[in-house]
Image: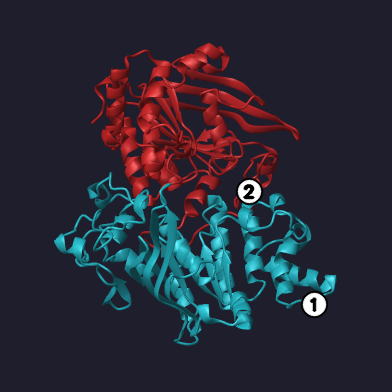
Amino acid sequence: MIPQTLLNATVRAESPLVEVKHLSVTYRTRAGYSKAVDDISFTINKGEALGLAGESGCGKTTAALSIIRLLSSNAHTEGEILFNGKNILSMNQAAVRDLRWKQISLIPQGSMNSLDPVIPIGNQIIEAIVTHKRIPKKQAWELTNELLSSVAIHPSRAKNYPHEFSGGMKQRATIAMALALNPLLVIADEPTTALDVVVQKQLLALLKGLQRKMGISFLFITHDLSVISEIADRIAIMYAGKIVEIGTKEAVLRRPSHPYAEALVNSVPRVFGERRILDSIPGNPPSGIWPSGCRFHPRCKYAFDLCKEKEPELTKSKTDAQAACHLISQGN
Amino acid sequence: MTQTKPISQQSEEQTIDSQRPILEIRNLKVYFQKRRNIIGRRQVIHAVDDVTLSIASGEILSLVGESGSGKSTLARAIVKLNQPTSGEILYRDQNISKLGREETKRFRRRVQMIFQDPYESLNPHSTAFEAIIEPPIIHGLVPSSKRERVGVVDRSLKMVGLDPESRRDRYPHQLSGGERQRVAIARALSLEPDLLIADEPVSMLDVSIRLGVLRLLQTLKDQMKLTYLFITHDLGVARYIGTRIAVMYFGKIIEIAPTDELINHPFHHYTSLLLSSVPGTDMQQAATTKIDVEYASNLADPPSGCRFHTRCPAAKEKCSIDEPKLVELRNGHFAACHYPLMAGQGLEVN
């Protein structure tokens, strides 16, 4: 079902496609400056799905949007984002425009509501294709039909309008659109939040299948750890503008090293298995003004004096992960 | 990993002062008229279609289902926000559509609702103090002196885990999401209700503060001897809080059972599909269900027979003709299915 034209992408495992180095993003607001992302570094390998998880206001969307240079004009970015070795942050507008959609595409949050209500779905996908690529209409239609089938929508539905689609189908249509130009990286911001569980499960399976078959790299942004467990190979957990833990899915979800990651994993009521004592995290996630030292210390049950003063660095933990916690850097 | 006493059992122990249900719903139908096109051809949306249900005093009934299944319409009908098309809702043996003026006022005091989004349900121009004191003022339940009113509000703020000094005079936008929902809960409880309808009360909250609000609801239920109808789309939450779980599909209740019974031995194929769709669980069935059958798009035109037959992996001819009735298949476990799943079938959970 995968379009032939999309099969060219080669999978070279373990070589980084995206290298984010010391990225910081500061927003200038009426109330002053707000550092939404503070000195984070991570890589996304070719063909890999990285999950970026965290609560609202932790900076995950800001971090992701800076990769495609879609931040609002009051944002000031520092650091480097290397895409195939080239620094996206120092490119001129034309070069960035050339990158968007063709090499990096975005499925924005609530994208199913971003479809134009008065244009049939198929025509909207065509528009995305012909804006970036000069191909005959007929060929574009063929590609559109292939794309729709690859996201399990029958090509005959291409002439339907968005209101004739259900939420899940609209979301799948926007995914088809994001895949239209055979990108190397797809950034998906909460792609399944508005969907019901049954549709969500199917959509996640679909995305995982596309990732494997087409060798696309994915950056998934979500607040829902169980969703990320379906799709990601590696997971980074953000808190208050920082990455507090990053590692393989198994390490981060099964044996979390950072107290915040641990608390997050333990605070979700499970459907199956033993009923466990759940760990609720006191207080609220900070917004805008970050606490001193380790930013999680006011809510952390293990916090000690050092945590208030010194900011911990990401260090290799006992599992297959790195975590920023003094307990780990002190070898406990 | 530490094991703990099941939460649903904890609450079961000190429940049920009387065997009489606090709420009984009989053959409830809520239909909506919808104009379909410019010619004016009318469509009828069967939002709630022949639901019979009873809630025992002191229990927490979790109501789950996908969006558009009629959960919220049912909840709104119970608090008289939606007019039933037919059927009866009895609150403590009284039909709520036949209440007089005074009785209605009393009913509104005793049955309260909390909503998904406290940012929308709280008045942006009212402080926490004003939001909480307003209902008791309307019902003439509080003294008129400001000092005593502050006392009343402070007590209820403490009860929902908020610091009165710092939070009393804040407006909704000055509170965090979790704090806003706590104010909404305090407001709902300010009239000392005995039945609380909670419509997705934690869905909008950040993961790290959800559990705190769930725990609060649990504690308040015990302290104030409340009964909950708890609507959620999250089966984990439904299991965490519920004594029983009811599953809605297309306006109907298709299965209802004590919590663990429903999770471990679902009879209905739809319940099984829901369970197997929980993210992070790896089970067979989700893959066998046809992906292109779309559900919410045609509520006005439900499938014949069993409404799930178009998506059901086990559907036979009978399913498209006869509508199955909700029958008791095991103690307290009801399901509406012609070919129910037997023990050990369908779900294999690791």
Distance between mark 1 and mark 2 Cα atoms? 45 Å
Q: Amino acid at mark 2?
A: Ala
Q: Are marks 1 and 2 in contact (CB under 8 Å)?
A: no
Mark 2, Cα crowd under 10 Å, few <14 / some 14-19 / many 20+, is: some
Write the residue at 47% across / 75% down. Answer: B59
Write the residue at 72% across / 73% down. Answer: B138
Q: Amino acid at mark 1?
A: Pro
- The x and y percentages for residue B12 are 45, 77
Q: Is residue B224 left or right of residue B346?
A: right
Colour chain A is painted in: red
- Please state which of residues B131 and B150 is positioned toward the viewer in this rendering: B131
Check disc 1 and report the residue beneath it.
B143
Q: Dot 2 lies on which element?
A: loop
Q: Is residue B174 visible?
A: yes
Q: Which quadrant holds residue B192?
A: bottom right
- Please state which of residues B200 and A267 is positioned toward the viewer in this rendering: B200
Q: Tag 2, which chain?
A: A
Q: Which chain is cyan?
A: B
Check disc 2 and report the residue beneath it.
A303
- Please state which of residues A321 and B233 is positioned toward the viewer in this rendering: B233
Q: Dot 1 lies on which element?
A: loop
Q: Quadrant of the N terminus of chain A?
A: top left
In the depicted structure, whether residue A328 falls above or below residue B71: above
In the depicted structure, whether residue A69 falls above or below residue A203: above
